[in-house]
Each structure stands twice: as C-alpha cells, then as structure tokens.
Amino acid sequence: MAVEKRNVSVTANGQACSAEVEPRKLLVHYLRDDLGLTGTHVGCDTSQCGACTVMVDGDIVKSCTTLAVQADGSEITTVEGLGTANDLHPMQQSFWEEHGLQCGYCTPGVMIAALGLLKENPNPTEEEIREGLEGVICRCTGYQFIISAIQKAATIIQESGIDLNSQQLVGEGTHNE
Amino acid sequence: MSKVVGTSVKRKEDSRLLTGNGRYSDDIVLPGMLHATVVRSTSAHAKIKKIHVEEALNHPNVVAVYTGKDLEGKVGPVPTSWYVPGCNLKEPPQYPLAIDRVRYVGDGVALVIADDRYAVKDAAELIEVEYEELPAVVGQKEAMKEDAPLLHDDIENNIALQWKAGEIPEGVMENAEVVVKESFYVQRVFPSPIEPRAAVAQYNPGSGELTLWCSSQNPHIHRMVLAEVLGISEAKFQVIAPDIGGGFGGKIGVYPDEALVAFASREIGKPVKWIEERSEHYTAANAGRDEIIEVELAGKKDGTLEAIHVKNTANLGAYLSTMGAGVSTIDFGMMITGTYDIPYAACETTGVYTNTTPTDAYRGAGKPESTYQIERIVDLFAREVGMDPVELRKKNFVKKEAFPYQNAQGLLYDSGDYEKPLNKALETLNYEELRKEQERKRKEGKLMGIGFSTYVEMCGFGPSEVVGAVGFQGGTWENSTVRVHPSGKVTVFCGTSPHGQGHDTTFSQVVADKLGIPIEDIEFVFSDTKSVSMGWGTYGSRSTAVGGAAVSFAADRVVEKAKKIAAHELEVAEEDVEFENGTFSVKGVPGKERAFKDIAHSANMAWNLPEGMEPSLEAQYFFKPENFVFPFGTHVAVVEVDKDTGEIDLQRYVCVDDVGTVINPLTAEGQVHGGVAQGVGQALWEGAVYNDNGQLVSGTLMDYTLPKARFFPTIESDFTETPSPVNPLGAKGVGEVGTTASIAAAMNAVVDALSVYGVTDVEMPLTPEKVWKVIQEKEGNQ
C-alpha cells in the first residue's frame, strides 16, 4: 500500500523547509508533524472552526482542508512567525493586554485570521471585525475581548507603520510599543 | 508594593499560548509512538454478530487490533462517579469496547493501533462489523413506554433512577389562588471545546509505571478511576493534563477511550496517542442537558409565590456517565426555588436510558436547567397576575437580611443581596424608558422583548461530608503546597486543574499579596498527579473558592514559619515582628528588618534556625469548605423579532454578576462573556439532533451551530461584590454564572416579544424557522 511520497518545500516563517510527504497529507499535519510548528491546531476537520488558519503567500488559508502539496513552493506564516515571548507582534501584544484568549487553542488561528482582516481593512469598525471573524470559532471568550484586541492591534499597526502586505511579519524589532 | 488582588493583572500563561508554545496533547511526541483510532458503531442499537479484523491486521502499518472480547479480564468497565442514594439507581456496566451489543452511534467496537496517523484510519476502514439491528429509542419519554425497546435487559422501562426531594403539604397547590404550569425542554447540546479529547499513554515495561497525558479537567479523578479500571497501582500511575483547549464540563468524564489508550500502551510496551476527530467527539464525548422539565408554580394574586413542583425527565443516554446521575437530581433539584423565598418545593427526577450518547455535566450542570425553569415560570406567573416581571421578582426575592438563608430544599445560601445587581442592571438599561420604547414599537407592529434572569447557583464543590452524603465519589476539598526556594522564588502546587480560566495568574495574585513578592517570582504547578499530592480538579466553579482558598491558607502557613525565623534572627519575640510588603520588621525599631528572600535563604540553609525547627520553607494546606458558595446576579436580554423572517436580533445584553470578591476583574469578565455566549447559544442556535433511528444528524460543525462573533452585540458586563463567608478570599465562583443565567434571559426576551400573541413557550433553539412558524400560526388565528 506504499504510496510514492512527494517533496514539499516551503518557506515557513522565513525559513526554507522541506519534507517528503504522502500526496494526501494535509497542510496542517505537514506543518505540525514534519516542520514541528505545533502552534497551529486542528479543531473541527471541516474548516469551520479556523483553529488551523495560516497565511499562504499572504492569503488566509485553512490548513486542515489544504493539501501540503498544494502549498509546495509557497511562503507560509504561522503563529510562530509573528513574534517571540520577548518581542510580541502587535497582534499578540494586544491579545495579551485585552485578554483576547482563555484556553489559547483557537488563538493562533484567530490572530492569523485577524491579520488577514487588517490587510484588507486596516481600520475596521467593531461590526466589520465581527463579520470578518466569520471563519473562526472561539468557545471560551464570547469574542468580545478578541474584538477589543483586534481594534487595539489595528491602531498600533497603523501608528507604527507596519506593512502587513510585506510577506515578512517576523522579527522586525518594532513589535513592542 | 501595592496589593494585586482585585486588579486586572495580565495573564502569566499567555506568553506561551500567544507564541505557539502551548503544549496540548497532540503536541506530545514520544520515541516509537504509535497511533490509535476507535472503530465506532454506526448503528444505534444492534447485536454484534461478528467483527472481521483480519484485513486490518494485515495492513503493513498495523501493530494491533483489539475488540471487546480481547479486553475481557484486562480492562474493567468504566464506572460512574456519582451514586446518588435513595433513587434506585441502576448502573449498567460500560465496557471500554462493546462486547456483544452496541447501544448508541459512537459506541466503541474495536481499537486499531498503527505506526502512522493516516494509516491507522485506513486500517480502521478495513474492519467490518456484522450487526443484527435492534429497534432503537431516542427520546426519554418514548423510552419509558411499555413497548419501548430495552437498552439493558434487566433495567425495566429503561429507568435509571427515580429521585425525589422536598414535599409540598396537601392542599397548598390545590387551594392556591394562582397556579401556572408549563413544560420546558432544555435540549441536548454539545459542550464543544475547540480541542477535542485526546490521550497519550506511555507504559514503561521495565518499571511497570504508566504515564497518561489526557485532556482532562480533573487528572486526579482520572487516575483514581482508571487505576481501578486498568488494575494498576495509583502509585505507579501518573496522569498529566497538559494545556487543554477548553473543557466546559465535557472533559470531567472518565471515558472508555482513555482506558483503551492506556491499555494499548501497556499491552504493546510503546507509547500510544489518540486524538479525537470532531465528528467522533459529537458521537462519543458526553453531551449536556436533554431534560424535559414540567413546572407548576403556585401563589397568590398579589404575586406572592407559595410553592413550586417540578418534574424532570432526563435523558441519560445509553450508559451512566461520570456525573450522569447527579446533574438532573442534586445539581438541579436542590436549587429549583432560585432566588425566591418560596416556602414549599418538591422535585421529582426520572433518569432514562436511551440509544444516544451519554449525557454528563456541561457548563453549570443542572444549575442552568434549574435556573431556566424558575426564571421562565416566574415570568409567566407575572404575566398571569398582571405584574411587571421585575416587580414580581423583587417581591419574592430572599431578602438580604435573611442570609445565611436555608431554601425549601435545605441548602444554606451563604450570602446575598439580590436587589443590588438587579437595580444596577435596571439603571444601565434605563428600564422604564425601555418599556416605553417597547410599547411604542408594539404600536408600530414590531416585536420587541425584554427578558430577565435573576439567578443564584450552587458553586464551589464542596463540603466533603455533603458531597459524600449525596453519593459523589470524591472529596471535593482542595490542596495546595507553597514551596519557597533559597532565592525567595516560589513554586506553588494546587489540586485544581485549569484549562483556560487563568488560575496561574489569579492564584499568583493571592500568593503575591500574602508573601509580598512580585507575581513574576511565583510559578504554579497544576494538573500532574505526580507533583500535586491530591486534588479534585476544575468544575462546578470550585477552583478559586476552594483551590484558591487552599493556596491562601498555605501561604499563611509559610508566613507563620518565616516570621518565627525572622524573630530568631532579629533577636526579638515573635509578637514584636510585623510582616508587610515582603519585609519582616520589628515594631517601633526602624531599620531592623529582614526581607522575605533573606528568610527564604535562611530557612533553606538551616545554619541558624530556632531550636527544634525543621529546615526549609514550605507549607501545605488541605482546605475543606464548610459550605458551597452561591453567586447570583441579574442578566437581561433585549431582542427584536422579525415578523417576516422569524429572525431574532439580540440588541442588548446587560449583566451584573455578584461572584463575591473579584480577584481579577479582567479575567472574571472574560469568564462571564464566554458563559453568556454558551447560554445564549443554547437558547438561540445550538441543538443536537437525532433522527428516529438514533443517527446523529448534527454531528459536525457544518450541522451544529456554534455561535460566531457576528451573533452578539457588545455584552455590557458589571459586578457587585458580596463576599462569601465560606472562604478567606470571599470568592464565590464565576465560571458558570454566564451560562446559568443567560439561557433564561434570552428565552424570556423572545417570549416577551411574542407575548402579544399569547405565546408562553417556543422550543429551543429559537431558529428563525420555528419562530416564523409560531408567528404565522398566531397571525392566522387572529
């Protein structure tokens, strides 16, 4: 039953990575099991919950319903690419300050989805954020503090002139206020 | 250093969760690790004729396949943990894999172990089960009928339990001026943590030690129960709950699947991982609620309430889950009078087995259902006697002078002031103006509704003697050890098991104030049976009121010892030493002092301790509360119902909760928001649906509506603080209040909107289709 494996090479969070995978392997399992990027989670298997949301070539993608081979050659940003504990990205910083997370399981996907939203609409209203979070489900927070966090992040990102459309979200050294 | 209890400290746990460094069960990878999957019944009720495993066994990646028969003598049935007394409770054995008969869609029939995450699923597909179909029964009322199929041959009429509490003297109901009756169905819903269940087991064939990481709210209970099921010593069995992606009651239960994973690791001698799929979660993980509640409320024309009689018919599913018997009896039945001084109350609960997934605790566990029936029926009573629902509530509230107050069912409410949060909410709402607006809108033909829920709930489980008397197989006291290292940094151990609540932070706030050290100097250890000597986990809004209290007491003991050492070093009597802001000083002698960290060093070095004193600076405290705690408050929903589409626009949601002393206002408010989303979710959107054959037709997130961000307005949340006398923190519990309160608030609002048609109930969830049908029917009748 051996299936011929395929090479999938990506730039993940600025690092060149490569692995031999079965053609049916989901992107989320490639990221988690082959690249060790376990910050991206699986919640529903059917692309409703958005815990698996990552950025592929600047687009928001549900990695649980994307094949790894489809992402071959792409640039991928996951939560690990945003910031570090000592140098949080404004989105992470805002989630922290506004208590935008409880169990933290959906959080990486929600933050990536929120960055996708801000790329489209840098200064969204509360209503636009609520609509813009259609692709993610949080069971802990009731969303209110997630919305406050995204509003705060939007302000910081605008004020500090961070370009969300540059592929490189990583290590800009301007993350902290 | 200023005190940190009562301030919105940012959470300590977040830096790992925000950066992708959380460690959830699926993040655990061990050398040689195998993968497990459970083949589950596709039939709701059938005899197993034969299970064909040969093809699966021939799969090149497969290591082992087990069926129920293979487990006989090796793994015992998974027992319930709540033997409610006096109710003729019948507990059928629940084997980890069904042996000769399946009783619900999702019942495990085979376990497959392979060396690859994908291959194990392939192999599971190769297993063929021959079933002989049996008739299935899904609803609890249907299951009690004479001709209903029996799930367990020796359990008559599928009745698992018949429980009664309270008595109403003859004549009270019969002679009452007003009796209002209604039947409510609190439908089956799924707790739905975004992380499904998970377990990783590692057995050491050399030492005989077993380690189980599992997505559990109470690892010590898992250890206690599974040690028995697996026949292993608790001393050789470590259970760890790593980061958990939400629980909401769904991860209290000790499940067959966890026993299977542990068994397989022991049998094969290699680590085994099992990660549940979402659709599997909805068939195999315990669901919540599913209770038909018939209420009669008696009183006077002037609005005085006199007696309440409640019958609850609860769907327990196919087997008795961990807390299964307690939810619809003790948790539900002792609180049926709510916040009202109703002299007489009686509750009769019948628990019924059906061909559905077992039900168990879900956020609030019995208390939301209890609050739901009393808050709904009180509204209908107000309508019947022509009173404003707020006025009727105020008239019947337990008065603040009456606390501690014993309710008709014998529970002693610790403290309360029910008008306080209600008045605050009325002010926020501008209530009188809101009613006028409603009148105006009604004249324009618009359907606006205002719904109240003025709840109280029993939290902080609990006093051991009481939980023992009601049959719970646990102690529910709590334990904490405060360990001070030579540097003055502190590690604290506690037996509760957080999974999103933020106890690392809130409990650190308690310790920081006690020891006068910065929060950054404090680290917490939870959720590991090898590190934490004993504990009972996190559920029933018990963690702060019981666990936080244990932490507080243990920190007191550390200070007590440290003070003795400081007095010895400062060469003064202990009574002359004061401790404030982390410094021991001598009364009236400025400059003569020792810092907390100096004493930490002294205690650990033990070069010069008071005579006879043991070295080190560490203290443990086991806190057994004398009573439960009873948070309360007012939740209000304002809705407008679209006549043409049946859609409900939730326009405002105002809540004022009194959870005793608030340790961290930010995280407390977060708990309320999350709770409200789940309760409103039950009222408006969520509902598990089975067809008549027992097939779950809402088994994925494509078919089961979990609330999204756009479903809600801004929740206007506030607190009042009435400390509890039961624990030194004055804390009551905040995890469940939002859910307990909000189901009734949302429903009362919609029923208020539809009251122009004389509507008294619509079955939850209030989908536009259902509401539209009701409106069409009523408009047609007019």
Image (cartoon, coloured by chain):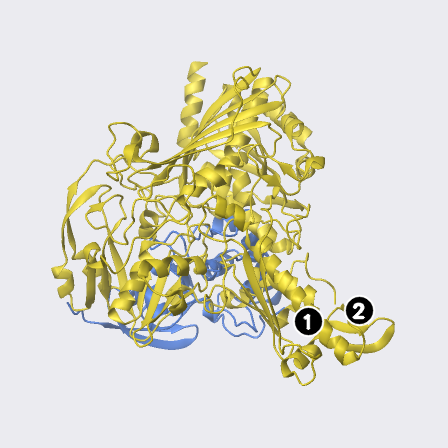
Chain colours: A blue, B yellow
- The residue that label 2 is drawn on is B575
Q: Is residue B314 above or below residue B123?
A: above
- The residue that label 1 is drawn on is B561
Q: Amino acid at mark 1?
A: Lys
Locate residue B547, reporting x and y percent: 57, 58
Locate residue B186, reporting x and y percent: 43, 35
Residue B204 quadrant:
bottom left
| Tag count | 2
In the visual, does B317 lie left or right of B668?
A: left
Look at the image and tell me whether residue A98 can be seen: no
Q: Is residue B535 above or below residue B701?
A: below
State the CA–CA distance, disc 1 to disc 2: 13 Å
User: Which residue is at a point 63% across and 72% down the rendered structure image?
Assistant: B521
In the visual, does B376 lie left or right of B717?
A: left
Residue B503 quadrant:
bottom right
Locate residue B400, reporting x and y percent: 70, 36
**Quadrant housing the N terminus of chain B:** bottom right
In the visual, does B297 lie left or right of B30?
A: right
Q: Which mark is residue B318?
A: none
User: Which residue is at a point 41% across and 56% down the rendered structure image?
Assistant: A50
Q: Residue furthest front?
A: B612
User: Which residue is at a point 66% across and 69% down the rendered structure image?
Assistant: B558
